[in-house]
Image: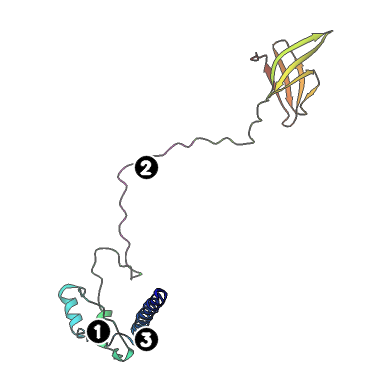
Amino acid sequence: MKAGVEEKRKVAILAVLLIVMLAAAVYFVKAVFIGGGPPPEATAPSPAAAPAARRAGGAVSAHVAQKISGLESLDPTLHPDLMAEAESLEYSGSGRNIFSMSSAPPPIEKVKGPVRMTAVAAQPTGPPPPPPIDLKFFGYVANGGVRKAFLLHGDDVFIASEGDVVDHHYKVDKISPLSIQVTDLLYNNTQTLPLTQTSS
């Protein structure tokens, strides 16, 4: 018994919703395709009123655009007197007339002081200098007249004699007690590296 009452209630709610949707659809179709009736008649200003207003105070102000519902309400008649008056208007503003090719440009403000010249630093010309040799000379040993240098490149330690190439990049030219002469083979650049102390 209770199930039948619930079914009737659902059917009634569905019927009410269908009626509301149908009414909304009819209203929408009527508003879109039929329209809400003819617009109210607008009182257009007479053709002679606009020139009088221009003569009195310049442009016509407080003019409200009217909505046109159909082409039959348009007036296709030309008014030569209004056209002639519009063509005879002369620009009376204080700025430049942007509608005239012969209008003089506005005066340019004169310079009030001398122009300051800023000195531009001379840019170096030519190729950039070669990078410094990334080796550290931290000791050497002399054994039978042959000197061997201890070199550090990053975390790698090299032992090189004069004429040896370190890391396929640096050639050891001369080993002295307090310095070493190394040539960068990629840049053909020779530098002297001093003896440095390495932190233990």
Q: Which residue is mark 3?
A: 33
**Which numbered marker is on residue 82?**
1
- Measured as percent of width and height from the top left, residue 119 is found at 45, 36
The kind of secondary structure element at disc 2 is loop
Residue 128 left/right relative to 163: left
Tell me which residue sits at (37%, 79%) in the image: 12
| Pointer 2 local density, CA inside 10 Å: few below 14, some 14–19, many at least 20 | few
Q: Quadrant of residue 148?
A: top right
C-alpha distance separating marks 1 and 3: 38 Å
- Measured as percent of width and height from the top left, residue 199 is found at 64, 15
Of all residues shown, which one is farthest toward the right? 144
Sequence-earlier tag: 1 or 3 = 3
The kind of secondary structure element at disc 3 is helix
- Label 3 or label 2, whichever lies nearer to me, is 3
Q: Is residue 107 magenta?
A: yes
Q: Which residues are magenta?
A: 103-120
- Measured as percent of width and height from the top left, residue 99 is found at 33, 71
Residue 54 left/right relative to 98: left
> Mark 2: which amino acid?
Val
> Mark 1: which amino acid?
Leu
Q: Is residue 91 magenta?
A: no
Q: Which residue is mark 2?
A: 115
Circles 2, 1 touching at the beta carbon (< 8 Å): no
Question: The C terminus lies in which quarter of the figure?
Answer: top right
> Mark 3: which amino acid?
Phe
Sequence-earlier tag: 3 or 2 = 3
